[in-house]
Amino acid sequence: MQHLNLPSYLEQSDDVRDRFARMKQRPVVLEVKNLSKEFESRGGSVTALHDINFKTRQREFICVIGPSGCGKSTLIRILAGLETPTAGEMLLDGRPVSGPGPDRGMVFQGYTLFPWRTVRQNVMFGLEVAGRSRAHAEEEARHWIDLVGLSKFEKAYPHQLSGGMKQRVAIARALANQPRILLMDEPFGALDAQTRARMQAYLMEIWQNIDITVLFITHDLDEAIYLADRIVVLKAHPGEISEVIEVPVPQPRQPDQFLSPEFLATKLRLEQLIHPPVADEEANDDALNMMRMVPKGSAVESVF
Amino acid sequence: MTAATRKSESGYVAPVALQSRVAWFAVRKELGPRPRLALSVLSFALPLLLWCAVSYIPWLWHPMMEITDPGDVEYFRAGQLVERETFEREAQAVVEGAGKLPTGNPANPIYLPAPHQVAAAMYTAFTDPPQRRSEKWLHESLGSSIQVIFWGFVLSSLIGVPLGILCGTYDFFSRLWEPFVEFFRYLPAPAFGALAVAILGIHQAPKIAIVFIGTFFQQVLVVSNTTRKLDPALLEAAQTLGAQRLSLLFRVVIPGIVTDLYRDMRILLGWAWTYLIVAELIGTSSGITWFITQQARYKNFDNVFAAILIIGVIGITTDMVLAWLGRRIFPWQRGTASA
């Protein structure tokens, strides 16, 4: 990649710069302030997240990316209220929140559909819990199922659906509650490449047409650049924000942008942040103990 | 599950259809429907064949002689069963005394009737009135037993299942109740026989109490463990959708475990039958146990076998009916593992 003559990822076209400027005028939906999380373990306490600060504005698409062990899953679980932070707070529309609630929808990597409920009943769950009338809940559910294109499968049970379909139901189920923010924890991580690409396109379409702010965790650099307005890059030990990148790729995104200079420039920067050049010593520690096991003069002596 | 859905689920076509020969011993591979059916039939046919062989092939086992003509042996009577050794010794003695030889056919001990005798007994038990006035019809005995099981099991489930679910859901109840239940589980239910009679009288009540004690404590632990096995991610998902406290319990925990709970109940019902036999021996003997002991006392072992077999038939039929019902009630059950 270094051979290419790439622009800096910080260079933005006028349109992109203008869009980011307008975005900064939008109201803040989620604000994370000085968030830290420590886990107690045998060898003392481990800092999973340290002093995380960022803001998400209305209808913004934010991706969080980082090497394994950087605490990105812990972060999203804290935002969803499934774990409590050791320090700091989060504000939703300016009000502090704690504990899980329907104002923050969550889509998990493992689908987590209720196996005993049909697609429609799954989508109705949040509405039922909120005490809506059955008729109203059914109609709402139908609307959201239609939106993710699964009307034909309304009466199917989760085990009858493919992975991509299950995740679409999970998205519909989260959106039916009309949350302020949609938290997605590596939602497409378990899907094959083709399905994942299709799901990314669906998600973009949904996001463009609904008043929803998305916070999306991934470890896939291409996915992050393709989807996000801004990317929060975490580093590990302790989990801290190393940079927040404004993605210079113009919106709306198209699959052919994957090879555009802005895209590659951003990817280069992410690669540098996430896979920094390793010191020789460290590299040696992790190397295979390999020796030649193909005899001289064998039919294929070398793979090259 | 039809072949079509299985194929679409895993995208994998079973190799059985392609190969002409069935791989009978493939590790952890399911056999096709035909070999499966054949093996199920064999599973019953093999023990039955063994029983037939022992019963009908004269040189297989048959340690006794059934006397057809006593000859000159004084204490032999026609129809009497004697051990083969005794028969041969007496015959030898007769030969030496130049008397008339006794004759007889090889036979099995009286406690092992032949399949056809048991089959006949199974039929006559329902058609011919009992030989003695004090005796009950087989179906009356069975009816009484089923009543004891039913009430013992229903009462136990009414209390045990809710307690188990509470223990599995809330650590509070688990810590409060489970240590005691764990302790009580080790006390053998029959040990409470005398106590149950003293408190509840001699009729059905103490028997129901024994089945209850035998089932209840296991039930609480089994149900609480099943409840704990519910995927916690489902609870988390429900929480992010706004479910709290009781709605978590009633909308997620209970529907989430109900299929496993149903399976547990089928297994526990089997255990309840074990306690029944003990329960029926206390107080006034009654039910199928009394029928069996009574028939054994008069050496009607064909009736004994018939009664035991009927218990088995009732057990397996109930289980199959419950399994079939389960598939009806829980349509999502097939392939839940992949959901």
Image: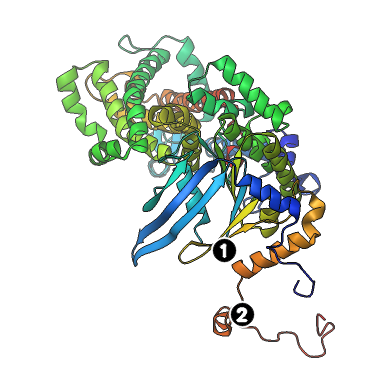
Residue at point 71% right, 46% down? A200
Residue under mark 1: which chain is it in?
A: A
Colour scheme of the picture = rainbow
Residue under mark 2: which chain is it in?
A: A
Q: Is residue A251 left or right of residue B296?
A: right
In which quadrant is the N terminus of chain A drawn?
A: bottom right
| Viewer-proximal residue among B124 and A103 | A103
Kindly identify which numbered label has been placed on residue A67.
1
Seen as rendered, the residue at the extreme bottom is A296
Kindly identify which numbered label has been placed on residue A288.
2
Between label 2 and label 1, give the one nearer the viewer.
Answer: 1
Residue at point 82% right, 81% down? A304
Kindly identify which numbered label has been placed on residue A232.
none
| Viewer-proximal residue among B39 and A69 | A69
Q: Is residue B227 above or below residue A217?
A: above
| Viewer-proximal residue among B247 and A46 | A46
- Give the mark count: 2
Seen as rendered, the residue at the extreme left is B198
Q: Residues within 10 Å of mark 2 (few under 14, many from 20)?
A: few
Residue B212 at x, y = what percent?
30, 26
Q: From this viewpoint, is residue B80 visible? A: no
Three-letter amino acid code at disc 1?
A: Pro
Task: Identify the element where label 2 is drawn.
Answer: loop
Q: From this viewpoint, is residue B227 visible? A: yes
Q: Is residue A15 left or right of residue A79?
A: right
The answer to whether the residues at label 2 and label 1 have Cβ atoms under 8 Å apart is no
Q: Earlier in the sequence, mark 2 or mark 1?
A: 1
Q: Is residue A104 above or below residue B284?
A: below
Task: Identify the element where label 1 is drawn.
Answer: loop
Residue A270 at x, y = what percent?
64, 64
Q: Residues within 10 Å of mark 1 (few under 14, many from 20)?
A: some
